[in-house]
Amino acid sequence: MTVSVNGKKKDLGEGEFLLEALKLKLSPDSDIIIYNGFCIDDLSFPLKDGDSVFFIKRGDFPGEDELEALMMSRHTPLVFEKLKKSTVGIAGLGGLGSNCAVSLARVGVGTLILADFDIVEPSNLNRQQYFIDQLGMFKTEAIKETLTRINPYLKIITHTLRLNETNTESVFQEADILIEAFDRVEAKTMIIKEASRMKKIIIAASGMAGYGENDLIQTRKINDDFYIIGDMEKESRPGQGLMAPRVMIAAAKQANLAVEILVEKNTVL
């Protein structure tokens, strides 16, 4: 009988072999056991030929296969595999884009293409996924640093530039889905038009300033390739600024919709 242990094939010979016995023999100090993609506590059953097992000790830095096994146990193997194969492009790395990138990195999207020309400023810290020690860095560099701390095995492609009609296609040609995360109306209009021309699914956002009224932030399907998230009313203006809670709600809905499309509509398969 052959099983996979922490990503490597191991021949256990003939006869019955309990998972509990395998743990005691190979990794007695392990705290987390992932069996065929699922985290389990009961080890008192016999292994089968072809089974996959990961033994992980809490506090140890996991290898790529171990980290993937942990994530797979949370998402289920089928969902994880679809997300791992996917590529999401994010246009703009401010409040929407940086928060969306963090969510997609945590959920296991395999590749992120990130584009922004700006640097991290003190005014960004009230709603964007940056830190004081990153002030003055390009947002592309800063968010890559943060995402790498979350998942060092994530593939991150950055473009430090101002997106326009002449470079958007070359930047995002490999993306399965685009996230629009700009502040300015002109930039939003441009990326939506470019996505349509490229026949890419795009998830845009409009109306998330101020605070409260969570339920007004809705998802609207314009057509099969175009979605908008927000309340469509509360734009940033004097007396009604952009604040972390509402911006993060909108960004989370953008990320969640991207995951739904990638998993359920088989965009990448």
Image (cartoon, rainbow, N blue to C red):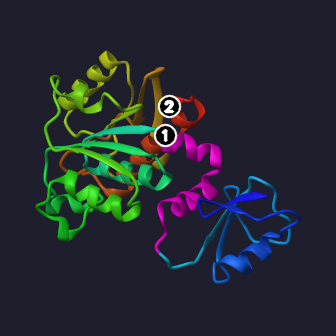
Residue drawn at (25%, 47%), measured in percent from left and top? 93
Q: Quadrant of residue 32?
A: bottom right
Determine if residue 260 is in view.
yes
Q: Do labels 1 and 2 touch, CB within 8 Å?
A: yes
Q: Quadrant of residue 36?
A: bottom right
Instruction: Name the disc covering residue 85, or none.
Output: 1
Name the kind of residue labelled 2 in the image.
Answer: Val
Residue drawn at (36%, 49%), measured in percent from left and top? 155
Which element is circle 2 on?
A: loop
Is residue 210 toward the left or the right of residue 257 in the image? left
Q: Which residues are magenta?
A: 61-84
Q: Main secondary structure of the magenta part?
A: helix
Residue at label 2? Answer: 268
Q: Earlier in the sequence, mark 1 or mark 2?
A: 1
Judged from this view, the residue extending furthest toward the bottom is: 29
Residue drawn at (64%, 83%), measured in percent from left and top? 29
Name the kind of residue labelled 1 in the image.
Answer: Lys
Determine if residue 209 is in view.
no
Q: Quadrant of the N terminus?
A: bottom right
Report the front residue among 108 and 197. Answer: 108
Is residue 133 toward the left or the right of residue 57 in the image? left
Where in the figure is residue 180, as x and y percent of width and height?
31, 35
